[in-house]
Amino acid sequence: MSGQKTPFELMMEQAQEMAKAFNPALSSFDPKGFESLWPTMPRDAMEMWFGKGLGKNGLDAKTRLLLTLAGLTMQGAQADTPLRMTVRHALEAGATEEEIAETIAQMSMFAGIPAMTRAMEVAREVMADGKKDDET
């Protein structure tokens, strides 16, 4: 049985073949490369659209993004792209790496260790990429 593919692996192969048939350029599509086309919103813009612009005494953008990060962690590995973008935006909105890690860790009680671990891996990648960008 160790050489056989799971039904999920077979389904993914079929989907990839179908995508290539529709558009050959999709055979080399990289979601992370696509994500880099979306710039991180400036903190002021986030505050205006998602922060206290909604209500004078409401949650600030940083808090809203940390709540979003908690929800995305709950979704597990299916949400890598929005999770990466939310980490980038949370950092821009003033969240510290520790606050991001604590938000994700808190979700282990609700989403489970595998979902928390995957979210931590994604967040670490984003933070490491940000540090590389700062060095250049």
Image (tube, rainbow, N blue to C red):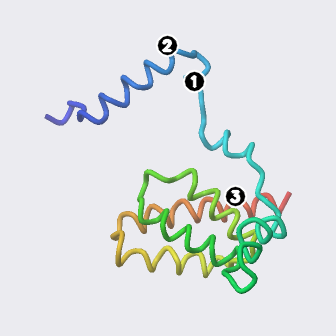
Say which of marks 1 and 3 sits in front. 1
- Which residue is pictured at 20% across the width and 30% down the height? 4
Tag 3 near tag 2, CB within 8 Å: no
Q: Is residue 131 above or below residue 100?
A: above
Which kind of residue does numbered mark 2 sit on?
Ala
- In front: mark 3 or mark 2? 2
Q: In the image as oriented, which residue stretches furthest toward the front?
A: 55
Look at 60% across and 30% down and name the residue there.
29
Q: Relative to 82, does residue 106 appear above or below in the rendering?
A: below
Q: Name the residue: 72% across, 46% down.
A: 36
Give SS at disc 1. Answer: helix
Looking at the rendered structure, which numbered label has been put on residue 21? 2
Q: Earlier in the sequence, mark 3 or mark 2?
A: 2
> Residue 48: x and y, percent?
80, 69
Residue at mark 1: 26
Residue 89 picture quarter? bottom right
Task: Specify few, some or many for label 3: CA neighbours under 10 Å numbering under 14, 14-19, or 20 or more.
Answer: few
- Amino acid type at circle 3 is Asp
Which label was assigned to residue 129? 3
